[in-house]
Amino acid sequence: MTGKPDRKTRITVLVALAANLVIAAAKTVGGLVSGSPALLSEAAHSVADSLNEVFLLASLHRSRRPADRKHPFGYGKERYFWALLAAVGIFIMGGCFSFLQGFEAVGGATGKDSYTGYVAGLAVLGVALLAEGASLARALYQARRQPGTGIGRDPALRTVVAEDGTAVVGVLLAAAGMVLHMVTGDVVYEAVASFSIGLLLVYVAYRLGRDAMTQLIGEAADPELRGRISALIEAQPEIDNVDELLTMQLGLDSLLVAARVDLMPGLDSEEVELVCVRIKRTVKKTWPRADHVFLDVTEAPSEVSTEQAGGTR
C-alpha cells in the first residue's frame, strides 16, 4: 500500500539531500571567505538538513520491514523515531550553532568588512534560494498529489517541507543581515539575523519533535474516523452497542482497532465467532489501513448459558 507514495517521498528526500549538500558546501566557503556569521549560521542549517535527509531515508527503508515474531505489529513506528532524530538534529546542529554565531558577532569575534566576500556570499545565498525553493516546490507538489495521506500524516514529507520552508526564510534573513551590515558597517544586523535563524530552527525542531513524540507514544485515529468505525460496528444487526473503541496509529498506513462490544442475546458460540470474523473483515475492507482489528465480546448470552447462569450475566 505504501510502496508508490514511499517511492515518491524517497525522490523528494533525495532531491532535498542533493540540494542541501551543494548548498552547505557553498555556504561554508562563502561564510569563511566573508566572515559572515549569518551565512555561517545558514551553512550549519544546511549541514543539519543534509544529515536529517539521511535519517529520513533510513526511516523510509526500515519502516517498511514486515512484521516478525519480535515485532508482531511491524516496524511502522520507526518512521516517527527517525523523524524525532531529525528534529533533534535541527535543534542542535542548526539552532544552537546559529545562536553561537550570533553571540560571537555581538562580541566582535566576527564581522569582517570584506565587501568582495560579502558580494560573493550574497551570490551564494541567491543560488541557495533558488535550490531550496525548487526543493520546497517538489515537496509541496507531492503533498498536494496525495491527499489521502497528505503532509500531516507522513513525517518524512512533513519534515522535508518544514526544512525547506525554514531554509527559504533563513536565506532571506541571512541576506537581509548581510546587506544591512554592508550598508551600515554594523555587525549587529548579522547577529540579529543569526539569532532569528536560531529561533526559527528551534521552533521548527520543537514542532517536529512534538509531533514525532506523540506518534511514538501512540496516537489515536482522528475523531471522525473513530466515529465512523464505531458507527459501522454498531450498525451490525447482532451488535447491541459499542461499549468502547480504542485506536492507535502503528505506522503511516497501519492502524490498530480494538472494540469492546455487547451482542444481542440468543447467539451461540459459533454464531459469535462468525459475527466477529465478519465485522473484522468489513472494517478492514472499508479502511484497508485498519490492518489489526480486535473485538472483545462482553455480552453474548444464549438461552443455554442464561439458564446455566441462573439468569445473570
Image (spheres, rainbow, N blue to C red):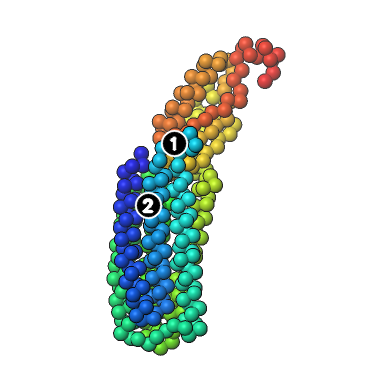
147 or 217: nearer the eye? Answer: 217
Q: Which mark is residue 57?
A: 2
Q: Residue at x 34, y 59 (%)?
A: 17
Task: Judge left or right: residue 189 versus residue 7.
Answer: right
For this rendering, which residue is in front, 172 or 241? 172
Percent coordinates x, y for residue 102 in the rendering: 48, 77
Q: In the image, is residue 173 above or below residue 207?
A: below
Vertical comparison of 170 with 86: above or below: below
> Does residue 22 sit above or below 193 in this rendering?
above
Residue 284, quarter of picture: top left
Q: In the image, what residue type sits under mark 2?
A: Leu
Q: Where residue 273 sits in the image (x, y, percent)? A: 51, 20
**SS at badge 2:** helix
**Residue that carries the numbered disc 1 in the rendered image:** 67
User: Residue 123: image x %, image y %?
Assistant: 29, 76
Residue 289, position as x, y percentages in the image: 42, 37
Quarter holding the C terminus is top right
Q: Are marks 2 and 1 in contact (CB under 8 Å)?
A: no
Q: Residue at x 69, y 18 (%)?
A: 312
- In the displayed structure, does residue 189 sit left or right of residue 269? left
Residue 133 visible to the viewer: no
Q: Of the numbered discs in the image, which one, if any, rests on residue 153?
A: none
Residue pictured at 57% horizontal, 28% vertical: 296
The count of marks equals: 2
Q: Quadrant of residue 32?
A: bottom left
Relative to residue 126, is residue 65 drawn left or right? right
Earlier sequence position, callout 2 versus callout 1: 2
